[in-house]
Amino acid sequence: MLKFDAKFEDIGFYGDIRTPFTMEDFAKEGFEFEDTIRVSFLDRSIIVPYVPSYRCTHSGGTVLVGDKMFKTIPLISFHSNFVKKYRIAAFIENEDRNVDILVAKGIKFPITFTLELEEKKGYHEQFQVYNLIRTNNREDYADLSDEDYCNFRAVKGGRIKEGILYRSSSPIDPFMKRDEYADACLKKYGIKTIVNLNNHADDTQKFPNYQYTYYSRQNVLFLNTNADITSYNFGKCVLRAMKFINENDGPYLIHCMEGQDRTGAVCAIFASLLGASKNELIIDFMRTYENFYRVKRGSEQYYKIVQGEMQDNIASVRGFTYSTLDILKHPVSFLNFLDITNEDIKKFTDIMQGKKY
């Protein structure tokens, strides 16, 4: 059994808890990937898997991540916020993503956490579904078009007119080695207005040759949203994106880093607003898994990922909660709650149908 006292400053940027333990510490304790670990804290006890990536779970799932990119092993809730999920603290963010962390009533730090083995290879079956591997080498995807390689495509569904709204991985960040392909797609399809969910405007200065890209000459809204699509801040960013689209000419592009999670959530809300069916939303959402991870449409893995991802909860810090599927059934009510007017919604839906203003 491992035990530590988490201080307030051990709360990470995304609401994770940073443990003091390294992968070597876990190995000495006998913990291996795919094992399930019982994590006890306060009056709670949860069972979480030990995995090599935070992606090795469904949306909202909690994991212990052994990854060399982290100095120590964090306790993370994927697409969510651990301390918020377990009512330890709330994150209050402004539009610039400056964060105030408010400790919940009755919670006092430090908080003692204990970690003990629950079951060897207890997560094996789920690990086979979610242990998705993507490379950043173009030659590994020789069978894909440049558009599929950079996850560029038109958003379809409902009443969205062809050629109005697109999505992609980042056309400016070279980390995934897809930026030049995505930028070429922007030029090919005449994209004029871009919603960047991944960066601050100042971030562009660190990207080589940014000033020479097609992207740099277009209208861009830099939102730098967090990875917690359950946050109220994320919902407000959806509204800012809609208003920016309303104020600028199309065609339009939505992107984050991979063009997968944050982009997928925004595009699903937009498409549902235009009457997209559940099946249309699933096909668009899962196209990324086909492009990046070779998940075969119609396979058992495909449907298990659909089930896990589409059941994610989107909740505001004000206590207003919808499941994603409810949001997609009632997007106008969700957007009204986030303080957008029906006039703004009508203008947006008109634009997506190809009407000019």
Image (spheres, helix red, strand yellow):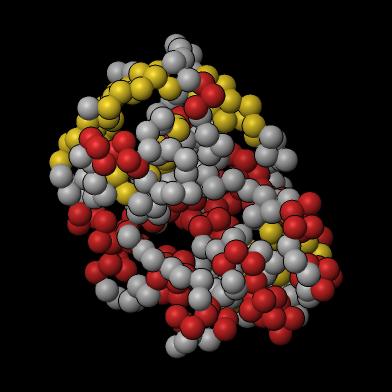
The answer to which quarter of the image holds residue 307 is bottom left
Residue 9, horizontal then vertical, whole percent: 54, 24
Residue at the (20%, 54%) spot, across then down: 124
Up/down of 336 relative to 196, above or below: above
Is residue 139 visible in the rendered structure shown here?
A: yes
**From the viewer's perspective, is 72 left or right of 357?**
left
Residue 56, horizontal then vertical, whole percent: 35, 54
> For this rendering, which residue is in front, 76 or 58?
76
> For this rendering, which residue is in front, 336 or 189?
189
Residue 151, horizontal then vertical, whole percent: 54, 73
Q: Quadrant of the C terminus?
A: bottom right
Residue at the (19%, 35%) spot, across then down: 117
Is residue 161 visible in the rendered structure shown here?
A: no
> For this rendering, which residue is in front, 25 or 182?
25
How many numbered marks appear? 0
Up/down of 330 relative to 315, above or below: below
Residue at the (49%, 83%) spot, across then down: 139
Residue 133, horizontal then vertical, whole percent: 39, 66
Q: Quadrant of the N terminus?
A: top left
Residue at the (45%, 12%) spot, across then down: 108
Up/down of 354 relative to 329, above or below: below
